[in-house]
């Protein structure tokens, strides 16, 4: 396989981030959710207006994983007020690491995580944290393998469905 490269995304990369977001989210979660809830979530959370706001937020950073000219995944990091919870300026939240299913097991997620770790260390953060769906054991194992531990849980509202996310953190 060719070399995977990671580049920082800006609002100019909106279409790429939007396409990866919709494709990977659908691949990962459609089977466990209703079509109506899925379509509503994709429209609300990965629409042009919302993603433009996120890409322009100075407290968020997006990184795209590329295989040649093809985007194969991306990551969103938040600090300060951009964090979905905690809002601790001494931490980064990994809000999303999304990888196209064809590239699962090919180290793309690990490369994106390694980038998050490098950025957090460069910016002298004390810890990384994230929320991961309790019914995603593959992702939970990935984060455990990278030194994350469970510290809490929260409810993630997906349409009419209340789902539990496990909150994990890693001290740096």
Image (cartoon, rainbow, N blue to C red):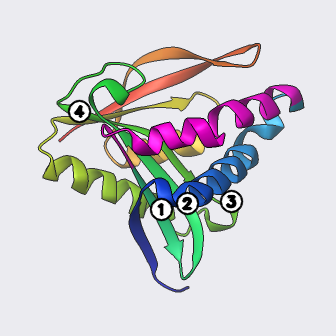
N-term mark: 3 or 1 = 1
Label 4 vs label 2: CA separation? 23 Å
N-term mark: 4 or 2 = 2
Q: In this view, does 28 lie above or below 165?
A: below
Q: How crowded is mark 1: few (under 14 residues within 10 Å), some or many (20 or more)?
A: many
SS majority, magenta: helix
Front-lying residue, 155 or 83: 83
Q: Are marks 2 and 1 in contact (CB under 8 Å)?
A: yes
* Residue 81, image quadrant: top left
Part of the protein shown in magenta: 36-61
**Tag nearer the camera, 3 or 4:** 4
Label 3 vs label 1: CA separation? 15 Å
Tell me the residue that label 2 is attached to.
73
On screen, residue 10 versus residue 147, left or right, reads: right
Label 3 vs label 4: CA separation? 29 Å
Q: Residues within 10 Å of mark 2 (few under 14, many from 20)?
A: many
């Amino acid at each position: 396989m060719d070399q995977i490269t990671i580049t920082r995304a800006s609002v100019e990369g909106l279409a790429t981030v939007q396409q990866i977001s919709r494709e990977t989210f659908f691949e990962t979660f459609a089977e466990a959710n209703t079509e109506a809830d899925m379509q509503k979530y994709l429209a609300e959370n990965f629409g042009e207006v919302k993603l433009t706001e996120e890409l322009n937020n100075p407290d968020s950073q997006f990184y795209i994983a590329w295989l040649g000219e093809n985007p194969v995944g991306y990551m969103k990091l938040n600090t300060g007020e951009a964090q979905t919870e905690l809002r601790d300026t001494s931490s980064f939240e990994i809000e999303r690491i999304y990888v196209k299913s064809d590239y699962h097991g090919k180290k793309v997620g690990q490369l994106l995580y390694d980038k998050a770790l490098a950025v957090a260390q460069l910016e002298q953060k004390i810890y990384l944290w994230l929320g991961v769906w309790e019914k995603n054991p593959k992702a939970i194992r990935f984060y455990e393998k990278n030194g994350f531990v469970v510290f809490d849980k929260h409810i993630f509202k997906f349409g009419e469905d209340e789902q539990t996310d496990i909150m994990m953190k890693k001290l740096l």
